[in-house]
Image (cartoon, helix red, strand yellow):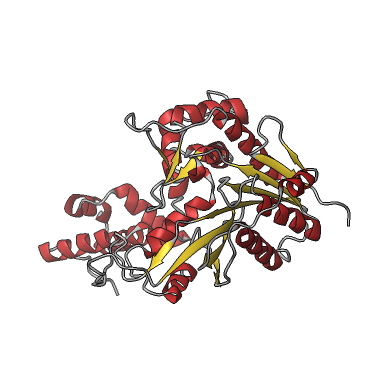
Amino acid sequence: MDVAPLALTDSIKVLLKDTATRLKGTERRQFMAQVVQSLGRGGGVQAERELGWNRGTVRKGLYELEHGPIHDAFEQRGRKPAEAKLPQLLSDIQAIVEPQTQADPTLTSQRLYTRLSAPEVRRQLMAQKGYNDAELPSDEVIRQRLNQLGYRLKRVAKTKPQKVIAETEAIFTEVNRVNQAADVDAHTLRLSIDAKATVKVGDYDRGGKNRVSTLAADHDFKPTATVTPFGIFLPQYNQLSLALVTSKLTADCIVDRLEDWWQQAKAQFPHIRRWVINADNGPENSSRRTQFMQRLVALAQREQITIQLAYYPPYHSKYNPVERTFGWLEQHWRGSLLNSVETVVRFAESLTFKGNRPTVSLVTQAYETGVKLTQTAMADLEKQFHRLPGLEKWFVEITPQPA
């Protein structure tokens, strides 16, 4: 029995156009084709005139009704991003920028700042990575990729000169060289260590915001306790170990944390024979701190691990990768009251950095301050490690004696 062609009344036209608008892709085309079929002979012309539908789209829908959906392949259309043609571009940009990057100096945000501008990054891509000018994208595209990777350019305020020492650039050059060599050596593990500012435990306002109403004390008072977060960070793996220390952070405490961490980590890294430790040459972990160096020599000998110390220049500790994790931690708990040591521990355990949770330990052992070697003992100890000529204070290698 023949079916009468569809009559396009005003209400039907509104309904058909509204329905077609709500559908997408092949579903929309096939719906339009079915409507045209129901209009009978000359339906395509009528649909174009009355409904505003494109006859090419309708023909494609009619084909799909008979042969099945056509893949639109929208992702294959248009201009491809630069990294589609240069698959190593983002990793090469990161390799150039990373050594010149610092955490937010205030440690109140997750921002990263680099000393390199987009034109300089582009120039170094050609000088270091072998790209040519024609194949590289423009400075503006490089700038966009730097932003995409999370790096921001920070200007130095003219009213606040950056503090440097004569050896600053030489130290940076050597740190970058040592770190790059460590990252490509399968038997070397790079560690970044440092301590965050001591946290006062109590009902203190930490300057953050919270969606839940939170009341802090309206005056300063003596804290109920203090906690110093000490971090051991593996930049290549984005793994963080946090020790929350309630005592003074001494040289003995620092090496104890390294020993405890290694007992947990050595199963993951059975092939490692060398550590490169990035630090800030502070008073308790300086290469001139006799107790620190003595404990490291003992650790290297016991574990048969070569330990190389590579310190950042003075006033530049924010380039140490572990500092970035402290920015995340500060932002994580800034809007809350850290009114007990247990609360500090719980907040540290719930931190997520680059998709990973840190391992957290609470250290309540009391450490004695002022422990040091005599000059004679230190002179004997000096024979067991090698200092880099010209930068003796900043680069030290401890090689264990054969077991």
| Residue 138 seen in the figure | no
Seen from the viewer's position, the closer of residues 187 and 69 is 187
Seen from the viewer's position, the closer of residues 393 and 111 is 393
Tell me which residue sits at (18%, 50%) in the image: 49
In the picture, measured across the screen, residue 233 lies left or right of residue 342, that is right
Q: Quadrant of the C terminus?
A: bottom right
In the picture, measured across the screen, residue 9 lies left or right of residue 165, that is left
Residue 254: x and y, percent?
61, 59
Tell me which residue sits at (71%, 35%) in the image: 388
Location of residue 151 by image quarter: top left
Q: Quadrant of the N terminus?
A: bottom left
Q: Is residue 108 above or below residue 81?
A: below
Seen from the viewer's position, the closer of residues 55 and 229 is 229
Looking at the image, the residue that sits furthest to the left is: 10
Q: Is residue 309 above or below residue 38?
A: above
| Residue 113 seen in the figure | yes
Looking at the image, the residue that sits furthest to the top is: 133
Residue 104: x and y, percent?
41, 47
Q: Is residue 81 above or below residue 211?
A: above
Location of residue 215 by image quarter: bottom left
Seen from the viewer's position, the closer of residues 184 and 224 is 224
Residue 107: x and y, percent?
41, 52
Residue 281: x and y, percent?
58, 45
In the picture, measured across the screen, residue 27 lies left or right of residue 198, that is left
In the picture, measured across the screen, residue 268 lies left or right of residue 250, that is right
